[in-house]
Image (spheres, rainbow, N blue to C red):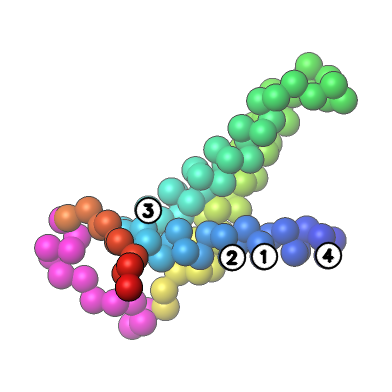
Amino acid sequence: LAFQVGRGLLWALLAWPLLGSLRGGAGQRGLVLGLLFAGLMASAQLQAIDYLPAAIWPAHLVEVAVENMLFGLVVAWGLRPLPGKAPKQTEADQQLPHVHFPDSR
């Protein structure tokens, strides 16, 4: 159980910078993070595994994708900005795509 908690915290820490760079509402950001988690983890199931019977493989693929999608939604909800703490966005900010280049100094 401690391993699973540590693994969950590691994934949440990896998601934090990504969530900070995404624009949109909490639901949109959660959907993007959920799809990313589901895609990353489910893609590992596409490799042939000798220990997993062929009859179980499709169900396991769906299980892993769904649970990681839900985990991404929960992480995005847990790391959302609190009301009143989010930076103000102008209408121009919402219409333009956000690209951030690090300062090279």
Among all residues in the image, which is located at the extreme front? 105
Question: Which is more N-terminal, label 2 or label 3?
Answer: 2
Among all residues in the image, which is located at the extreme left? 92
Q: Which mark is residue 96?
A: none
Residue 85 magenta-highlighted: yes
Q: Which mark is residue 9?
A: 1
Q: Which mark is residue 28?
A: 3
Say whether residue 86 is visible. Answer: yes
Question: Which is more N-terminal, label 4 or label 3?
Answer: 4
Question: Which is more N-terminal, label 2 or label 4?
Answer: 4
Q: Which mark is residue 2?
A: 4
Mark 2 touches mark 1? (CB < 8 Å): yes
Mark 3 lies on a secondary structure that is: helix
Mark 4 lies on a secondary structure that is: helix
**What quarter of the picture does the C terminus occupy?**
bottom left
Q: Is residue 105 above or below residue 15?
A: below
Instruction: Tell me the crowding category of disc 2: few under 14, some 14 to 19, or many 20 or more residues within 10 angstroms, Cα based.
Output: few
